[in-house]
Image (cartoon, rainbow, N blue to C red):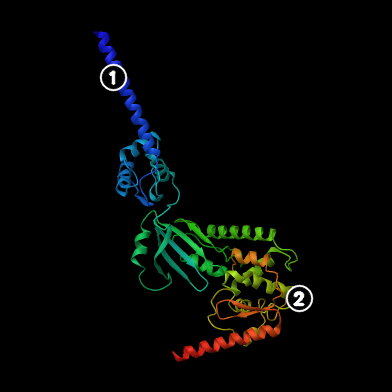
Amino acid sequence: MWRHIVSNFLTLLVVVVFLLGGIILWGQSQYNTAGPHADPVCLRVEPGSNMRRVSYQLEQEGAITSGAIFRIGVDYGDRSGSLKAGSWLIPQGASMAEIADIITRGGASTCGTEVVYRVGVTGSEVVVRELDTTSGRYEERVAFDPAAEGEQPEIFARVREQNDTRYRVALAEGVTSWQVVEALKSVDVLAGDIAEVPSEGTLAPDSYEVRTGDARADLIDKMRAAQDVILAAAWENRAEGLPLETPQEALILASIIEKETGVPGERRQVASVFVNRLKRGMRLQTDPTVIYGITEGRAVLGRGLRQSELRRETPWNTYVIDGLPPTPIANPGRASIEAALDPDDTDYIYFVADGTGGHAFAETLEEHNRNVAKWRQIEAERSNGSSND
């Protein structure tokens, strides 16, 4: 009798162990299998939250099939105490294991709201953007001038109170170092002063992520380091036979190219004009250098140049000086630096606006004069059209 009881017990125990092993294997499979959600999810984890609350959020969003399995898997991986507050982008079909890694890894938030402080050539603005998880792109919610009088948009004040809001400082190509320093003074998430305006041309136009309390001086150093890397790489790969003796001269030429054209496809053509002029000993005769001689990068001229200004002697006026000016006239971007050091192979020595936003290029003065006449006709027609409105 006892043997029969023991035998039945052992049989039951084997069945229980087998079933338990099956459940564990099934749970592991569920934890590591692709999730059910067909679209990305932006999961916001509030400070002080816990895995139970987060698992409920994930269930509500349809990102996981079982909050219990998710919590068991997190506990088994010893990650329950590693939950990080922030906004985390959960990719479509992410497994529970992948989600657990995302929300415990830490670092900057990967979705949610972003505030961008844009430093432009003609002014600065603050833009509040939010990630559209469907498109994967940040969509603009509001933009405003930080220097304008009046109350700031309500959404800006609200997102500033959220601990997971990301911040970026974006420099446009062609801004001057003085403009950058002045703009950074109004970026109130940054701290500290900038001892002096950096040398012109030494800051890389780009978008830089910052955190509340970061030092302005440290951000300037980061911009400098980025420009050093870009310039060094372009100089290393420069074309042969250029009339440029140092990386600094390349930076000066790149800044002129940057200010002369906003059309990406013609940067190397513009570069070829200036390279050809330097090779022939011709003066560069470019208006942006004259403007820099007037403003020294501390203002936007906002009007056309006068004949007296074209004749005025300044260190940067390439109508009266030979060769390159002594310093860059702005902070050029990567594309303009690369164009300066690898220009198109042309015989162009002239160019003028063509009315489309680009330029008409010429090899001879006769051809250039025809292009100038066409441009003046376009200007006259536009002026007449404006006066008739």
| Amino acid type for the residue under numbered disc 2 | Arg
Quarter of the picture containing the N terminus is: top left
Residues at badges 1 and 2 in contact (C-beta under 8 Å)? no
> What number is the disc on residue 280?
2
Front residue of this view, candidates 383 and 38: 38
Q: Quadrant of residue 388?
A: bottom left
| Amino acid type for the residue under numbered disc 1 | Leu
Front residue of this view, candidates 181 and 25: 25
x%, y% of residue 124?
Answer: 47, 70
Which mark is in front, 1 or 2? 1
Residue lying at the far left in this picture: please name it: 1
User: Would you say 213 lies left or right of 63 here?
Assistant: right
Residue plotted at (68% across, 65% down): 341
Q: Earlier in the sequence, mark 1 or mark 2?
A: 1
Residue plotted at (30% across, 19% down): 13
Disc 1 marks which residue? Answer: 12
x%, y% of residue 142?
Answer: 38, 67
In the picture shown, does residue 291 fall above or below 6?
Answer: below
User: Would you say 240 lies left or right of 188 here?
Assistant: right
x%, y% of residue 134?
Answer: 39, 57
User: Would you say 376 lies left or right of 41 here?
Assistant: right
How many callouts does the rendering have? 2
Quarter of the picture containing the C terminus is: bottom left
Could you tell me which secondary element the residue under label 1 belongs to? Answer: helix
x%, y% of residue 340?
Answer: 66, 67
Residue plotted at (35% across, 45% down): 36
Q: Is residue 158 visible?
A: yes
Tell me how far mark 1 sits from mark 2, CA to CA: 98 Å
